[in-house]
Image (cartoon, rainbow, N blue to C red):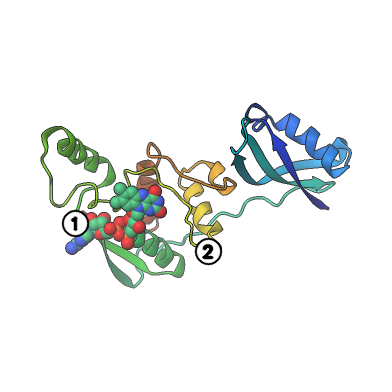
Amino acid sequence: MIKQVELTLLPKQAFDKELIKKIASSLSKVNSEEIKAVVPVRRSIDARGSKPRFKLLVNVFVNESPEPKEKIIYRHVDNNKKVIIVGAGPGGLFAALKLIQLGFKPVIFERGKDVQSRRRDLRDIQQNSIVNPDSNYCFGEGGAGTYSDGKLYTRSTKRGNVKNILNLFVQHGADEDILIDAHPHIGSNKLPKVVQAIRETILQYGGEIHF
Ligand SMILES: Cc1cc2nc3c(=O)[nH]c(=O)nc-3n(C[C@H](O)[C@H](O)[C@H](O)COP(=O)(O)OP(=O)(O)OC[C@H]3O[C@@H](n4cnc5c(N)ncnc54)[C@H](O)[C@@H]3O)c2cc1C
């Protein structure tokens, strides 16, 4: 059986797994020996009062264990039919991953540089006012927002189910927190590495990327 309860926690309590289990046990009225796992579903911060509080929605697994997390399966497409993609922004990279899942070989042509080399061109913009027209804040592997903080939320009410996308980011190195945070973001320090990991998946399964 799975019971769902919402905990209200002080910031210093919000990551204390033992305490969370204890409170979840009390709220769900289940003995802690019967609880096999307490799995966070959603976490948000209520900062309206003088003392900010975390709201944590959790699933309490009573006498049963959670299913293992599903991994996205890719297949080798080295010799399969080619599909040309122009641009290695989010649109191009996600199209490539989807094509691999469907059994096509993506071949990406990107006008800019790979995500790490791009960093040097950004430094040139900041320090020397030199703009490389092919490799800058907008152009290059990862696309326009790569050197921002990677916000993953929107005010749109037509957001749909984005769980698969969030799982894909986690599979490529993003923090698991993005799966439960109400306002998830990958972080500017991690985003280029996630982009690089996505490229490595594309290459590993037989896709091509030409810079
Ligand atoms: C500063 C900034 C911060 C942002 N922050 C966020 C955020 O936090 N969260 C969020 O969700 N969105 C953010 N965005 C928006 C997000 O970056 C865009 O929605 C997204 O990049 C669009 O993806 P795309 O693949 O359609 O296009 P682009 O990202 O523009 O990718 C196009 C790619 O094609 C390449 N290209 C262009 N012309 C050619 C050509 N002729 N031949 C070959 N390649 C070519 C480019 O180099 C680029 O890599 C931000 C955008 C900016 C500018």
- Observer-nearest residue: 207 or 128? 128
Q: Identify the mark at residue 157; answer none if there is no mark.
A: 2
Q: Position of residue 173 (x, y in %)?
A: 46, 43
Is 130 positioned to the left or the right of 188 in the image? left
Q: Position of residue 95 (x, y in %)?
A: 38, 64
Marked residue nearer the N-terminal end (2 or 1)? 1
Q: Position of residue 181 (x, y in %)?
A: 57, 45
The image quadrant that residue 56 belongs to is: top right
- Seen as rendered, the residue at the extreme top is 12
Q: Is residue 79 above or below residue 14?
A: below
Is the residue at mark 1 in contact range of ligand 1, meaning its CB lies under 8 Å from it? yes
Is 180 positioned to the left or the right of 136 in the image? right
Q: Is residue 199 visible?
A: no
- Observer-nearest residue: 170 or 204? 170
Q: Amino acid at mark 1?
A: Arg
Q: Amino acid at mark 2?
A: Thr
Q: Position of residue 98 (x, y in %)?
A: 43, 65
Mark 2 or mark 1: which is in front? 2
Q: Identify the mark at residue 111; answer none if there is no mark.
A: 1
Q: Quadrant of ligand 1?
A: bottom left
